[in-house]
Image (spheres, grey):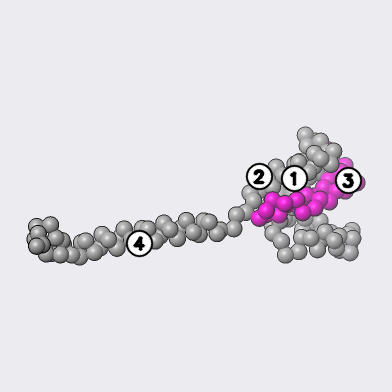
């Protein structure tokens, strides 16, 4: 026997019960989708993390980080500016350019605090994996 006092269907609360159930179900769907999206989202290396990785490379090459200034930006403007300068040829750097082509990377640029000819370098870090792709030092 059905107890008429406890059944939302018989008390006219059918729509409230249905609405509450749908709201709860939608929350589960939304939260589940967000968790899946985060799981498959492509993680990108932050600028600071790229510089930290590049610093290790620079130290291993014997440079004094205390006398160097590091810079990096999303567009790799220092690297693009260097590539577009007239005193280099792409042929000289074809191997490096081949390694960079088709990849998203940070071009971390280091220059000596004291202006001088040479002593600067680039360290190229993959934005997705944090892998050191290559470095390019100037004498």
Which residue is under mark 4? 26
Seen from the viewer's position, the closer of residues 114 and 79 is: 79
Which residue is under mark 1? 54
Q: Which of marks 4 and 1 is nearer the N terminus?
A: 4
Q: Quadrant of residue 32?
A: bottom left
Report if the CB atoms under discs 2 and 3 are less than 8 Å apart.
no
The question of residue 96 being in magenta is answered with no
Locate the N terminus and report the quarter of the image it occupies: bottom left
Q: Check the image and report above or below for 78 versus 12.
A: above
Single out the mark in the foreground, 2 or 4.
4
In the rendered structure, the answer to whether residue 73 lies left or right of residue 89 reads left
> Which x, y percent locates residue 138?
88, 48
Single out the mark in the foreground, 2 or 3.
2
Measured in 3D between alpha carbons, the distance from the residue under mark 3 to the one under mark 1, in whole angstroms, is 19 Å
Dot 2 lies on which element?
Answer: helix
Which residue is under mark 2? 48
Which residue is under mark 3? 118
> Which x, y percent locates residue 80?
77, 58
Measured in 3D between alpha carbons, the distance from the residue under mark 4 to the one under mark 3, in whole angstroms, is 61 Å
Instruction: Classify mark 2: residues with Cα within 10 Å, few (<14), some (14-19) or many (20+).
Output: few
Q: In which quarter of the image is residue 88?
A: bottom right
Q: Which of marks 2 and 3 is nearer the N terminus?
A: 2
Measured in 3D between alpha carbons, the distance from the residue under mark 4 to the one under mark 1, in whole angstroms, is 45 Å
Measured in 3D between alpha carbons, the distance from the residue under mark 2 to the one under mark 4, in whole angstroms, is 38 Å
Dot 4 lies on which element?
Answer: helix
Dot 3 lies on which element?
Answer: loop
Residue lying at 46% horizontally and 58% vertically, measured from the top left: 34
């Amino acid at each position: 026997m059905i107890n008429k006092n406890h059944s939302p269907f018989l008390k006219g609360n059918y729509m409230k019960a249905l609405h509450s159930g749908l709201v709860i179900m939608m929350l589960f769907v939304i939260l589940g989708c967000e968790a899946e999206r985060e799981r498959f989202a492509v993680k990108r290396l932050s600028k600071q993390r790229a510089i930290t990785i590049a610093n290790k490379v620079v130290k291993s090459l014997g440079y004094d980080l205390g006398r160097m200034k590091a810079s990096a930006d999303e567009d790799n403007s220092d690297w693009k500016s260097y590539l577009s300068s007239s005193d280099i040829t792409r042929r000289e750097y074809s191997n490096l350019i081949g390694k960079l082509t088709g990849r998203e990377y940070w071009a971390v640029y280091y220059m000596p605090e004291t202006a001088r000819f040479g002593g600067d370098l680039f360290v190229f870090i993959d934005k997705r994996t944090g892998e050191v792709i290559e470095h390019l030092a100037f004498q």
